[in-house]
Amino acid sequence: MPQNPKIGPSVRTFEQSEARFRLLFEHSPDAIFVESLTGEVLDANAAACRLHGLERHELIGKNVVDLVPAAQRAEVRRSFPQLAQRTGETLAGESLHADGRSIPVELRKGVRGSVLSIGTVPSRR
């Protein structure tokens, strides 16, 4: 059976695109989370691990509610479903480090329902 000559280049193009995305994801200075619509962490980059003081395998499977200070959990639980449906917004928030510190962050919602980028807010002197 003859093979479609367009399949080979298409697959290579996709693999190259995937490799570029993975490189950007892993080396971004901002924390990047891939999440489900219910807030479950499906993947996280090295910056996300540093932000929370956790290993990647410890972050995967956690819910976003568990990654914010206790005082903000009810609000995050209430607002996350609406946030997951929107794109392009930047919000102020706080992340919870494993040592108990609360870290001011800016949350940038990317692709609808799946990618959240978090940058720490520079300390003001």
Image: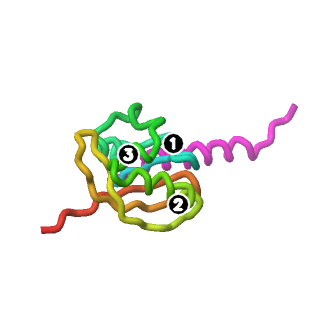
How many circles with numbers are drawn on the protein?
Answer: 3
**Please, what secondary structure does the residue beneath circle 3 have?**
helix
Locate residue 29 relative to residue 34 in the image: left or right. left
Q: Mark 2 points at which residue?
A: 83
Q: Bounds of the magenta span?
A: 1-29
* Residue 19 drawn in magenta: yes
Q: How crowded is mark 2: few (under 14 residues within 10 Å), some or many (20 or more)?
A: some
Residue 54, horizontal then vertical, whole percent: 32, 36
Compared with 101, 79 (above or below) is below
Q: Main secondary structure of the magenta part?
A: helix
Q: Who comes first in sequence, dot 2 or dot 3?
A: 3
Badge number at residue 121? none
Q: Distance between the residues labelled 1 and 3?
A: 11 Å
Q: What amino acid is at disc 2? A: Leu
Which residue lies at the image location 56% right of the left edge and 64% below the top edge?
A: 86
Screen quadrant of the N terminus: top right
Q: Mark 1 points at which residue?
A: 40
Q: Residues within 10 Å of mark 1 (few under 14, many from 20)?
A: some
Of residue 45 and residue 81, the one placed in the foreground of this image is 81
Which residue lies at the image location 43% right of the left edge and 67% below the top edge?
A: 90
Locate residue 79 relative to residue 119 in the image: left or right. right
Compared with 104, 3 (above or below) is above
Residue 82, horizontal then vertical, whole percent: 56, 60
Residue 72, horizontal then vertical, whole percent: 37, 54
Q: What amino acid is at disc 1? A: Glu
Q: How far apart are marks 2 and 1 (CA)?
A: 14 Å
Which residue lies at the image location 49% right of the left edge and 49% below the top edge?
A: 21
Badge number at residue 67? 3
